[in-house]
Amino acid sequence: MTDDDLSRSAAEDEGPPRAGASEGDPPRAGASEGDPPRADAHEADALDEACAEEIRRDEAILTRADAALPGAIMAGEAAIAERIAMDTGAPDTGHPRKWWIMAAVSLGMFMALLDVTIVNIAIPAIINDLHASVARVSWVINAYSLTLAVLFLSMGRVGDKFGQKKVFLFGLVIFSISSLACGLAPNIEWLVVFRVGQGVGGAAMTPISLAILLAAFPRERHGMAVGLWGAMGSVAAAVGPTLGGLIIELLSWHWIFFVNVPIGIAAFALAFAVIPERKPGAHVQGVDVPGILISAVGLFCLVLGLIQGNEWGWTSARILGLFAVAVASYPLFMWWELRTPSPMFDFRLMRIRSFTAANTAMFFIGAAMGGAIFLLIIFLVNVLGYSELHAALAVTPMPVTALIVAPNVGRLVDRIGPRVPAVIGCIFFFIGLTLLAQLTGESTLWDATWRVIFVGAGIGFSMPTMSAAAMGSLPPQVTGVGSGALNTLRQVGFSLGLAIVVAIFSHTIADNVKNGAIEATKYVQQQTSIPAQAKQQIVAGLAKAARGAGSGGARGGGSVSAVTANLPSPPAGTPAAAQAAQLKDDISAIFKNNVAKSFTWPFYAAALAALLAIGPSLFVGRRLGEHLGHEEMTRSERAEASTAEEG
C-alpha cells in the first residue's frame, strides 16, 4: 500500500471534516456557498469550546468516580448506590434488597429478644427446679447481660474492620449452639456458663444488626427503619411471655432454650443470602486487645460487686476491692484509648452531642428496665399466686403497646426530630414504673396489666428514638462501634438496674417476711376457737416457713402459699376443715401484704432511673444528623454550628 493510499484511508477514518476547517473542505450541511468564511470560523470556535467544556465535565465526573471506587467497594453495594446518587443528583433509595436485609437482621434480633423475655417468665420455674435463690438465679440474667456489656463495643469494632456480615453470622451460630447447651444444663452453675455463650452470640448480633440496617436505608428514612426494627423486637417480646408460659405449662423450662435452634438456622440461611459484606473500618490497623481487656475487667468488677454486695457485705474487702478496680478502670481505659494508634473506641465521637446524649439516656432507660420486669414476674407468681402463663398474659400488653407505637414513632422522628419523642418516652416509663410500685398483696392480674401499658408506650417512644438519634450523626466508618457503644451503655444500665433492685429487694424481704410471721402469730393467738395445742403447732409451722421464705432472697420472695402449706388440715367436710381453710386464707393475706412491700422501693428505684433519662433526652437534637461531622470540630466550631442550626 502506497503512502497516498494510507493518507486516503486515514482521511476516511477521520470521518467528515469539521465545519470551517479549511477552504478546500466540503461545505458543512445546510450551508450555502454564499456564507461568509469568517462566520464559519467563529461558529466552529464556539462549537469547539462547548465540546471541550463537555469533555472536561465528563473527565471530572470520571475522576471523582475513580477516586471513590475503592471506598465504594469497601462499603459494599449500599455505599455504591449512595455515591452514584451523589454524582448524578438522583435521590438515595438505599440498598435494592433493603427490605430483605431488614427481615434478616430482625429475625436474628427476634431470636435474641425472644430468649430474654422467655427467660424472665421461666425464672420462678428455674428457682424451684434447680433449688436456687433469687440472688443466684439473677445470674442467669446477669451473666448474659454482663457478657453483652463487655463485648458489645469490641464486637462493633471487629465488625467494622473484618466484615459486619461475618460477625453477624458468627453471632447467630454461637447463640444457637449455646441455646441448645442451656436447655441441657444439669444445674444452675452450668446454666450460667452457657448463658455466657449466649451473651457472646448476642453481642455479635445486636450492634452489627443496627449498623447493617442503617447502611441499607437512606439517611432520611433511618427513623422509620429503626422503628420497624424495634417493632420486630417488640413482636418477640410480645410472643415470648405467652410462648414461655405455654412451654412451661406443657413441657418444661428447658424448652425455652431449645426453641432458639430452628429460629437460628432460618436466620442464618436468610442472612447469608441477602446481607452484603461491609468493612467500613478496614483501614484501621490492628485490634485494640488491651482496650478490650481493660473495659471487660472494669465492667465485670462493677456488676459483680453490685450483685454480691448483700451476700458478701457492702463494706467487705472483696466488695470494696471490686469497686476500686471498677473505678480505676475507666480513667485507665480513657488514657489508653487516647494514645493507642487503633483505639477500640474513638473518644472524639463524644463530641457529637446527639450521640453522647442518646447514649446517656439509654443508660438510664436500661437501668429502669433492668430489674422491673424481673421482679414483676416474681411478684405475680410468688406473691399473688398466679401461674407463669397467667403472669405472661399480664405483661403481654407491654410489648404489644411497644409494637404498635414504635413504627409510628419512627416516622414521627423522621419528620419532627428525636427530642420530643425521646422525652415523651421517658415520661411514660416513669409513670408506668411508679404505678407498679403501688401494687399490693390484694392486687389482681388486671391491676398489673393496665399499668404495664404505660411501660410499653415508654419502650415504643424511647428505644427507636434513642437508637436513631445516636446513629444519625455518626460517620459511616464507625457505625459498628457506635452501635456497640449505644448497646454497651444500655446493657451496663440494665445490669446495674437489676443489681440495684435485687439488692433493695433482698435487703427488705427478710424483714417483711419476719413482720408477716409476727403479725400472723398474733392473729392465731387471738383465735379463741383454736385449741392451745393446735395454736402451738400452727405458730411453729409459721416460724419455720418464714425462715425458709426469708432466707437467700426468699427464693423469689418465697411463695406465699408455701407459708401455709404445712398448717394442720382436718378431714374434709368437717367444721374444723372449714375453719382451717379460713385460717389459711387469713394468714396468706397477712403474708401477701407484708411481702408485697418488698417490691415497692425496687419499682420506685427503677422509676427514678427513668426520670433521670429525661435530662439527656433534651439534647438528642431537633433533627436526625444535626451534629454530623462534629467529631472533627473544635468546641468553638461546634458552638458556631449549633448556633447556625438554631438560627
Image (cartoon, rainbow, N blue to C red):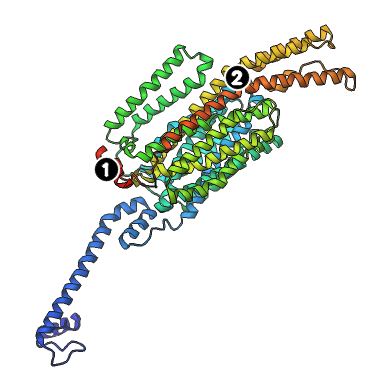
Residue holding disc 2? 553
* For discs 2 and 1, the disc positioned in front in the rendered view: 1
Q: As shown in the figure, which amino acid type bears the numbered disc 1?
A: Glu
Query: Which label is found at residue 491?
Result: none
As drawn, the residue found furthest toward the bottom would be 33
- Write the residue at 53% across / 43% down: 460
The image shows residue 636 at horizontal and vertical percentages of: 25, 39
Q: Toward the viewer: 122 or 309?
A: 309
Q: Residues within 10 Å of mark 1 (few under 14, many from 20)?
A: few
The image shows residue 108 at horizontal and vertical percentages of: 52, 44
Query: Which label is found at residue 640?
Result: 1
Q: CA distance from mark 2 to mark 1?
A: 55 Å
Quadrant placement of the N terminus? bottom left
The first of marks 2 and 1 along the sequence is 2
Query: Above or below — where is 42 with respect to 220?
Result: below
Judged from the image, the secondary structure of the residue bearing numbered disc 1 is: helix
Residue 292 position by quadrant: top left
